[in-house]
Image (cartoon, rainbow, N blue to C red):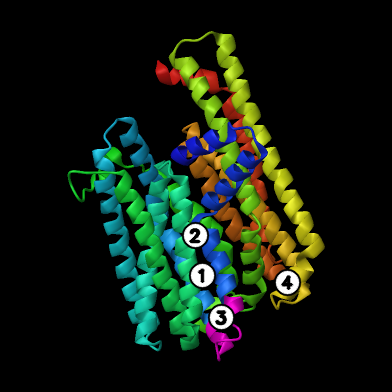
Amino acid sequence: MAGIGFELRKVMRRQTLIGVARAYVYAGLISSGPLILSIFGILIIGLMSLKSVSRTFAIVQFQVSVTYLIALSLILTGPFQLSFTRFVSDRLFEKRDELVLSNYNGVVLVSSLLASVGGLFAMLLAFKEEQLLYRILMIAGFVVISNIWIAVIFLSSVKQYRQILLVFAVGYACVVTLALALNRYGLVGLLGGFVVGHIVLLIGLSGLIYRNYRSERFISFEVFQPRFAYPCLALVGLLFNIGVWLDKFMFWYAPGTGARVVGPLRASVIYDLPIFIAYVCVMPGMATFLVRIEAHFVEFYDAFYNAVRSDASLQHIYEMRDMMVNTVRAGLYEIVKVQTVVLLLIIAFGGRILHSLGISPLYVPLLVVDVVSASLQVLFLGLLNVFFYLDARRVVLHLTAGFVVLNGLFTGITLKLGPDFYGYGFVLSLLVVVVVAVRRLDRKFATLEYETYMLRA
C-alpha cells in the first residue's frame, strides 16, 4: 500500500478537519476493497430482491454461490498475492519497471488457468444436476474474482487513489444494478448480474494498471523463477486465507449447523449472516489501520533506516526507533478504541439491525462475538503488516500457521459444546495469535538496532 499511503500522507498534512475526514473515508473504502464491498453488495442485492424474486430460496442460493466464489478465489490466489507484491516492490526499487506489467499478465494467466481448470472440474463432477448457464456463470465468476484480487494487490503501488475509488464505485454500482435488473430470472439472473458487474470492475482496474505501466513484452514469468520466488510469502498468503475461512467451512459442513443449498454447496444460517454483518462493521477499523500504518508508522520507519544508512548519531537512531514503536502502539490502541465504539453500537442497536434485515434478535449474542472477532482480525492484520515492514517473514509464517491450527481446534470444540458457544472458536484463536504477535513485536523492537547493524555487516 506504499503508493496509496503516500497520497494519504499528503491529505493528512493539510491539517484540516475535512482533509483528515477525507483521508479516513478514502482509507476505509480502499482498505475494505472488493471483499467487504462484495459482502455489502450481497446483502443489498438479497434485501432488494425479496419482493421481485418469486422463489426466495433463489436469493439464498445466489448468496451462498457468491460466498463460495469469494472464499475459494481468495484461497486459490493467496499464494500469489504477497509473493507478487514483493516481486513488484523489488522491481520498482531496482528501477526495472518494464518487468512489472509483463509479469502481472503472467500471474493473471496462471491464475485464470488454475481457476478455469478447477472450476471446470468442480462443475463437471459435483454440479451435474444444475443448469448449464449456472455452471458457466460460476466458472466465469471464479476466474473474474480471482483476477480482481490480483489486480487490487497490483494497484497497491499506484498513487491514483481517487481513480481507484471511482472504479470501485462504478464497478459495484454495476454489480448491484445488474443483479437487481436481472433478478426476475431467479438464481441465474442474480448470478449473471453479479458476474457481469465484476467483469466491469475488472476492466476498470485493468485500465488503471495499463495506464500506469508499460512493458516491451506483453507477458513474462520471471515472478515464478526460483531466484524471484518467495515461498514463505506464498505459504503465508495461503495459510492466512485458509485461517479466515476455516471456521466458516466447518460450520457449513457440520451436520448440526449446515444445510445443502445448491449442488454440494452448504450454508449455515445460524452462523453466516452475523459474520457477514460483522465484516461490514470493521470498515472504521480498517480505515484507522491504513491511515495509522501508512500515514504515520512508515514515515518513522523510513526515518529510522535512513538514519542507519547515513550513519547518524546513536541518539538520533534511538529517537527514530522510539517514534516508530510509539506510532505502532498508538495505531493499535486507536483501532481498539474505534472498534470498541462500533461494538457498543452493535450491543445497543444490534437487535434493531437484525430485525430490519428480517433476522431474529436471538442472533444478537452471536453478532456481538462476530464483531469482536472481526475487530481482532483487523488488529492481527495490522500486526502482520508491521512484521512485513520489518522483514520478519518467519514470524508471520508461524503466526498464520498457528491461526489455522487454533481456529480449527477451537471451532471444533465449540461445535461440540453447542449453540451457546458458536463463534467463540474464531474469536479465541484470533485473541491468542494477537497476544502472541504483540509479545513477538515487543521483542523484535527491543533488538531492532542490533539486527539492523548485523544485517549490514
Q: Residue at x 49, y 87 (%)?
A: 184
- Which quadrant: the C terminus? top left
* Residue 15, position as x, y percentages in the image: 63, 32
For label 2, the residue is 169
Give the mark toward the camera: 1 or 2: 2
The mark that comes first in sequence, 1 or 2, is 1
The answer to whether residue 149 is left or right of residue 371 is: left
**How far separated are the C-alphas under marks 3 and 4?**
17 Å
Give the mark toward the camera: 4 or 2: 2
- What is the three-letter code of the residue carrying label 4? Leu
**How far separated are the C-alphas under marks 1 and 2?**
21 Å
Tell me the number on the disc at residue 354: 4
The mark that comes first in sequence, 3 or 2, is 3
Q: Residue at x 39, y 68 (%)?
A: 142
Q: Secondary structure at mark 1?
A: helix
For label 3, the residue is 60
The answer to whether residue 88 is left or right of residue 319 is: left
Q: Residue at x 55, y 15 (%)?
A: 317
Task: Characterize the local packing of mark 1: few (<14), some (14-19) or many (20 or more) Cα atoms within 10 angstroms.
Answer: some
